[in-house]
Image: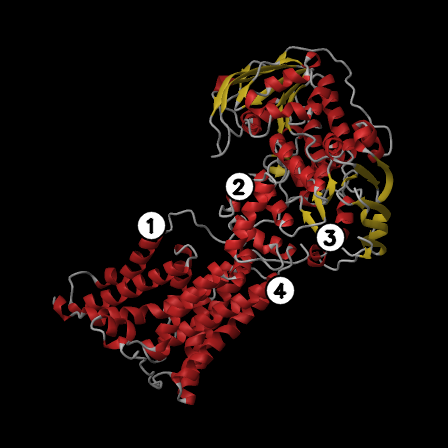
């Protein structure tokens, strides 16, 4: 066992890389759930985004175009969910689960020709001056731009929900869709837009794994991150900063346990492998012991006539 | 009053199978408090929805301050100065007061300015309200203030209030009336819908009475008795329940020093309650809501277990028995909350009849249900209590409040109880239906059953009770013969801290 082989600066920098896909997917799902929709298809939208982004990046040679395609792919898949639940009044839980299964199958089909292909490298986004700061520079300011995007997305969602009228209306729709309708707000339209945003975020998170973090394509490579994102939203009590904290915690423990495995710590690998899940959930359960609760209309279908 | 504010001419609205409004015409003056009276289904709600732009009239016109007025949606009505406080609050429980108010405004100011204005307006009208509080934590009266202030901030010329007092305590009603009088003195007209005729007499300048969609009369409530108004609403002389004067028999139900903690966090625990009811007797229990009524009903129905000897039926200790065992012995109960407690909203009337009737009516054998018998039982209830529904297969939720109330009371009465306990038997029920429910309770007592009526309607209790007691903070006052009681004595029985009820008797 040689703990000195672990470089804390590299560890913290890779923590952020590990947290980013989870953060993207969870912040999207947070907006969806705040609008009163429970989309269990996050995993399916992530993996679809992962292959869409990968395929387009390989074919165009541009990872940025790939990321845009990933967001588009996730949004298109979520549109299917929106059609089912908002217009055909299908059950949200069943539709979400089938969306995940559909996404996994669809991505495997698209990805058949991309096994073992190497995607174009993603440029590093060193921020001038700031990235030269010792310790903090390499950790915070020498990442790719998707990391910054994810952070600003979190900030933006927080500001939008807390301070803007659009955010207030979104929360109102998620709280009591009947009252929102009576006041003249377009419940279905707002929900569809939220679902599309959630799908785009999940797709982006998936492509971050296939294009930047790994980077290659293997079937089922999101490996349950979408499910963790769903749990994260609940345990973070629908609060954006707690989602960020939970994502970093999960990313941190994931990276740390890999490093510990490599360093040969005398703990069975299985325990190390389960530790990120356990620790993230325990911390967030303790934090969610306050009085915050789910949006009251979460998961309930809305029909204007009823 | 200076001139006409809103003039309604020949408004007609028909739905398939029913004409909700048939050329309704009347005027509302500026600053006038105008009452709209009528039984359930008389067309009051449809009429105000047309004024508020939620429903489009088939025929007829409206003029607001002399100009044609035809709102296509609520926002147009709000822009024209018409505001409405809904019967069922349209609020967001997880959001705070200021956010709720902002959602109901077309162009809300910034949150900080809005909070300041909410404070100003709420102080001005004596409706204290903290803009930062979460609506879910507020009482029913405070929630209504949120709705009223949401309306007032838009400076309305006409304020429509649909049954505003049904969820308020008497103290809150008094505060509301002061606010409405102040608004009226400032020139805002109020269109006030209520069942409570004494309230209308206390508050309103004029009244228009609707029956089956037509205007059948107008009156000045201050100069008209509640009885005359009720008869105009019903269209025939009102049947006053009469008691047959049956024999008072032996004690059937005895409660001895009953103390139970409330199962809910915000409930009232019962403290040392003792009472006895005899065969052929109606015992009325009054008191302001939330003083232990629900808990007493729960303890009697068997939902809240008690010490075995605390409740005795025919001398047998039943305190530890559950609801089914008590029903088998003849102690039946009908709780206050119709949807969700007395009836399962999404189940049919047949299934609801089965749920409480299976034991005494023999609607099941060896775990199998007897659907045919259950259907005839439900049909018998519908027939005898004049429940208006297309058939017993309809869901309980589809019935109007008054009709469902007739069904849930009728369901218990038809099972020939030894002892029947009802909580708020005529809440939200129109005058004619209330009279028939009260008559059924009196007939039951005349037939030798003991009846306990828990109610907040003192007129009702005085009308049908032989003995009267009052619940106050979970304690029961002395029980006294009802016919000798004066209004002052009743007020004292209901407790000093609730001294306002006297004004409303």
Q: Circle 4 sits on which residue? A: A88
Q: Confirm whether residue B19 shows in the render.
A: no
For disc 3, the chain is B
Mark 1 burial class by Cα count in 10 Å: few <14, some 14-19, many 20+: few
Check the image and report above or below for A237 versus A59: above
Where disc 4 sits, the SS reads: loop
Q: Are marks 2 and 1 on the same chain?
A: no
Q: CA distance from mark 3 to mark 4?
A: 31 Å
Q: CA distance from mark 3 to mark 1?
A: 48 Å
Residue B138: image tag: 2
Q: Is B171 in front, or is B398?
A: B171
Q: Circle 3 sits on which residue? A: B52
Q: CA distance from mark 2 to mark 4?
A: 37 Å
Q: Nearer the viewer, mark 3 or mark 1?
A: 3
Residue A286: image tag: 1
Mark 2 burial class by Cα count in 10 Å: few <14, some 14-19, many 20+: some
- Residue A187 picture location, percent across and down: 60, 61
- Residue B62 picture location, percent across and down: 82, 53
- Residue B9 picture location, percent across and down: 86, 51
């Amino acid at each position: 066992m040689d703990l000195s082989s672990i470089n804390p600066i590299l560890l913290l920098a890779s923590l952020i890389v590990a947290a980013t896909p989870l953060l993207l997917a969870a912040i999207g799902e947070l907006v969806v759930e705040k609008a009163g929709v429970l989309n269990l298809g996050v995993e399916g939208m992530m993996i679809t985004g992962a292959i869409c982004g990968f395929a387009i990046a390989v074919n165009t040679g541009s990872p940025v175009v790939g990321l845009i395609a990933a967001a588009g792919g996730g949004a298109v898949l979520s549109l299917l969910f929106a059609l089912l639940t908002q217009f055909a009044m299908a059950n949200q839980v069943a539709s979400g689960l089938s969306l995940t299964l559909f996404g996994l199958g669809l991505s495997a089909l698209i990805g058949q020709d991309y096994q073992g292909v190497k995607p174009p490298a993603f440029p590093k986004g060193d921020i001038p001056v700031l990235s030269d700061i010792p310790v903090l520079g390499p950790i915070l300011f020498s990442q790719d731009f998707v990391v910054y995007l994810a952070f600003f997305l979190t900030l933006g969602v927080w500001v939008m929900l807390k301070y803007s009228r659009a955010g207030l209306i979104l929360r109102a729709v998620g709280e009591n869709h009947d009252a929102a309708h009576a006041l003249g707000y377009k419940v279905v339209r707002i929900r569809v837009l939220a679902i599309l945003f959630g799908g785009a975020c999940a797709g982006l998170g998936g492509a971050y794994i296939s294009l930047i973090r790994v980077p290659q394509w293997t079937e089922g490579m999101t490996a349950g991150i979408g499910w963790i994102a769903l749990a994260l939203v609940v345990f973070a009590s629908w609060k954006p900063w707690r989602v960020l904290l939970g994502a970093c915690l999960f990313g941190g423990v994931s990276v740390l346990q890999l490093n510990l495995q490599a360093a040969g710590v005398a703990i069975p690998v299985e325990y190390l492998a389960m530790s990120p899940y356990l620790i993230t959930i325990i911390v967030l359960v303790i934090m969610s012991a306050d009085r915050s609760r789910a949006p009251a209309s979460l998961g309930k279908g809305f029909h204007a006539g009823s | 009053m200076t001139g006409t504010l809103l003039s309604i001419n020949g408004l007609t609205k028909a739905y398939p199978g029913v004409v909700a409004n048939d050329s309704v015409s009347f005027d509302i003056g500026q600053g006038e408090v105008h009452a709209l009276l009528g039984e359930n289904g008389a067309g009051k709600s449809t009429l105000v929805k047309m004024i508020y732009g939620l429903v489009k009239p088939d025929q007829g016109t409206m003029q607001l301050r002399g100009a044609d007025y035809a709102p296509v949606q609520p926002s147009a009505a709000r822009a024209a100065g018409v505001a409405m406080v809904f019967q069922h609050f349209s609020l967001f429980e997880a959001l705070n007061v200021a956010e709720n108010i902002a959602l109901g405004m077309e162009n809300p100011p910034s949150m900080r300015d809005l909070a300041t204005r909410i404070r100003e307006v709420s102080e001005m009208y004596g409706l204290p309200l903290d803009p930062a509080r979460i609506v879910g934590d507020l009482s029913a009266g405070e929630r209504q203030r949120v709705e009223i202030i949401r309306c007032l901030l838009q400076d309305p010329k006409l304020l429509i209030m649909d049954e505003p007092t049904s969820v308020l305590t008497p103290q809150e009603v008094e505060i509301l009336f002061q606010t409405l009088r102040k608004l009226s003195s400032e020139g805002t007209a109020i269109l006030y819908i209520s069942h409570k005729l004494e309230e209308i007499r206390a508050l309103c300048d004029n009244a228009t009475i609707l029956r089956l969609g037509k205007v059948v009369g107008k009156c000045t409530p201050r100069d008209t008795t509640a009885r005359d108004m009720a008869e105009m609403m019903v269209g025939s002389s009102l049947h006053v329940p009469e008691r047959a004067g049956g024999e008072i028999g032996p004690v059937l139900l005895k409660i001895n020093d009953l103390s139970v903690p409330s199962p809910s966090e915000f409930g009232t625990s019962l403290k040392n309650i003792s009472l006895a009811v005899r065969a052929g007797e109606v015992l009325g229990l009054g008191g302001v809501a939330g003083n232990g009524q629900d808990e007493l009903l729960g303890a009697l129905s068997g939902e809240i277990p008690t010490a075995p000897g605390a409740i005795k039926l025919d001398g047998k200790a039943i305190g530890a028995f559950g609801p089914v065992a008590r029903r088998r012995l003849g102690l039946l109960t009908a709780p206050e909350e119709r949807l969700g407690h007395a009836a399962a909203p999404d189940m049919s009337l047949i299934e609801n009849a089965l749920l409480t009737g299976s034991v005494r009516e023999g609607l099941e054998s060896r775990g199998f249900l007897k659907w045919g018998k259950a259907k005839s039982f439900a049909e018998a209830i519908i027939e005898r209590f004049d429940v208006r529904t297309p058939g017993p297969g309809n869901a309980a939720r589809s019935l109007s409040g008054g009709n469902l109330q007739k069904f849930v009371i009728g369901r218990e009465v038809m099972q020939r109880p030894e002892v029947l306990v009802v909580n708020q038997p005529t809440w939200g029920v129109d005058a004619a239906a209330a009279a028939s429910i009260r008559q059924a309770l009196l007939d039951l007592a005349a037939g030798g059953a003991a009846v306990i009526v828990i109610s907040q309607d003192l007129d009702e209790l005085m009308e049908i009770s032989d003995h009267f007691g009052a619940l106050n903070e979970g304690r029961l006052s002395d029980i006294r013969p009802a016919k000798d009681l004066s209004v002052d004595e009743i007020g004292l029985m209901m407790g000093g801290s609730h001294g306002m009820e006297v004004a409303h008797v």
